[in-house]
Image: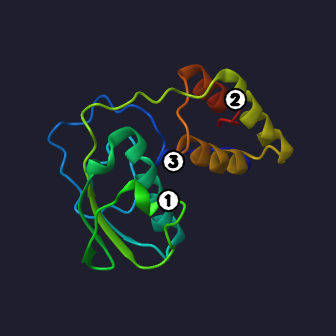
Amino acid sequence: GEGYITRMLLNGCKLFDIDRPKHAPKVTHKKILDYRDPNGLYVLKLEDPLEYQVAVDLCRMTENHGFKSWKECKYNGKPFTLTPQHLWPEHLEPQGTLSVEFQRSKYVVWIAPITDDQFYNIWRSTEAGEGLDEWKLSFVQVLSSTVYLTCSQAEVILRSFEWA
């Protein structure tokens, strides 16, 4: 019925996919960053805000994977090697084309989920809206692409929706 969620899209959410086949085909040109499996070739037009954000996130991933995770990189068609001196992402201009093959390190620092205090402070802000499921769903999509959640935090989110 109206006002109820009958279907929920979880694209981009950080949920563990235990059943993913090991032989899944590799995407050639990525435009969306999958934090669980970031490996791949990215060709990003930095004028596009979404593609620019992927470039920023790839820059930030060097904190856990190192600068050697950027392979075969080109910036505006010219070979490029990312180093700390570039001060990216802070000084990354939103123009041009960035092409990078990202290969994550075998030794990754575990990224812990947010604490319950952090979660409840963020989640309370959903009550500032009218509490519409559509609004909460948009909020959850942004939240789950930014931080990791525990199972109990995900349960709080799912229980907040009107289910038909």
Residue wearing tag 2: 118
Towards the viewer: 154 or 4 = 154
Name the element at disc 2.
helix
Query: Looking at the image, what colour scheme do you see?
Result: rainbow
Q: Position of residue 118 (x, y in %)?
A: 69, 29
- Which amino acid type is marked by label 1? Pro
Please report the residue visible at 71 percent of the width from the left and 50 percent of the height from the top: 135
Residue wearing tag 1: 89
Can I make out residue 50 in this image? Answer: yes
- Which amino acid type is marked by label 2? Gln
Discs 2/3, front:
2
| Mark 1 Cα shell of 10 Å, populated few (<14), some (14-19), many (≥20) | some
N-terminal-most mark, 2 or 3: 3
Q: Identify whether 40 is placed above or below 115.
A: below
Q: Viewed as shown, does residue 34 lie left or right of 153?
A: left
Q: Position of residue 71 (x, y in %)?
A: 22, 57
* Quadrant in the rendering for residue 125: top right
Q: Viewed as shown, does residue 98 lie left or right of 112?
A: left
N-terminal-most mark, 2 or 1: 1
Q: Identify whether 106 is placed above or below 78.
A: above
User: Hey, which residue is sitting farthest front in the picture?
Assistant: 85
Residue wearing tag 3: 9
- Which amino acid type is marked by label 3? Leu
Name the element at disc 1.
loop
